[in-house]
Amino acid sequence: MDVEVFTRYEFKYVVDSLTYKRLVEALDPYVNTDTHGDEEGFYAVRSLYYDTADNLFHQETLDQEIFRQKLRLRTYGNQPMSDRAFVEIKKQFRGVVSKRRTLIGLQDGYLMLDGKIKQIPANRLTSCNQQILREIDFLVKFYQLQPRILIIYDRQAFQGIHETDVRITFDCNLKRVTQNFQFEPAPYGERILPADAFVLEVKVDRRMPLWLARILSELQCFKRRFSKYATGTEAKTALEETGYGTVV
């Protein structure tokens, strides 16, 4: 999880708990659990999304713009407040996802994304990717970004045994927080998907391997456009009308 710059394809699915169990069983011969998680590959994820006052980035997603972007502060696992987080720019163009991110102290991340980077002592930023910091600082100031929503969930992650570029994740217990954006304590928040819903994401550098395509086809998993940020922002409508999130 410490790669700073990468480009890949991402395919998303939303499945129920029974299909999830069948998928994990079918995938077992082809994948290993993520070493950053527990013995089953689970770890917590918290993502604080930033947007304009009129939610420009969110609207770009809803409108399915050819180019769209997100800015977020993200932690993995149950880190204390003194630990580090990723500050990330995520962009999508014609289905290709690119991500630029760098590690930063969690408290410093709050300051930076609040436009207060000059208040952070320079020695605390020496280990960060300076180019990415400049890009993020520009985005924050140009768009006048502000924290909009915190999305928290549990993730189970796997990596292909032979196709090491293949990464498969299942996200569950998705919740949102719309005020008092602190990463601790947890768990808390308002549920944004049914308790038995799992967001499956397949991430590959090139193409999906045949064994994975076969498993998804046999278990009738169909690709769909899905955004955690959009679903969290539209959570009430998503739960009442579809039960499975905002299709974007």
Image (cartoon, rainbow, N blue to C red):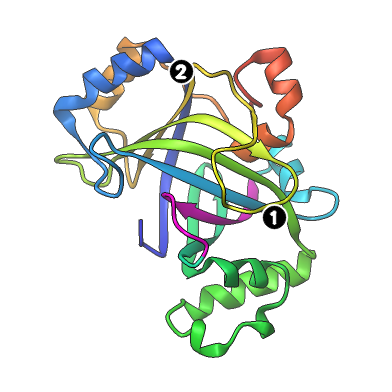
User: x, y (%) of residue 79?
Assistant: 44, 56
Q: Nearer the viewer, residue 31 or 43?
A: 43
Left or right: residue 92 versus residue 9 is: right
In this picture, residue 176 sits left or right of residue 102: right
Magenta-highlighted residues: 67-81
In the drawing, what numbered circle is on residue 162?
A: none
Q: Is residue 145 above or below residue 149?
A: below
Q: Position of residue 100 (x, y in %)?
A: 49, 63
SS for dot 2: strand
> Is there any visible trace of residue 84 in the rendered image?
yes
- For residue 18, above or below residue 2: above
Callout 2 crowding tier (Cα within 10 Å): few <14, some 14–19, many ≥20: many
**Mark 1 nearby-residue class (10 Å; few <14, some 14–19, many ≥20):** many
Q: Which residue is mark 2?
A: 15
Residue most extreme to the front? 185
Camera-side residue of 209 and 109: 109
- Which picture quadrant has residue 201? top left
Q: Quadrant of the C terminus?
A: top right
Q: Earlier in the sequence, mark 1 or mark 2?
A: 2
Return the residue at label 1: 50
* Up-down relation of residue 245 to residue 178 (above or below): above
Q: Using the rendered image of the protein, determine whether residue 69 is visible from the camera's viewpoint.
A: no
> Between residues 23 and 155, which one lies in front from this camera angle?
155
Left or right of residue 111: residue 100: left
Q: Is residue 124 magenta?
A: no
Q: Residue at x 34, y 14 (%)?
A: 217
Q: Amino acid at mark 1?
A: Tyr
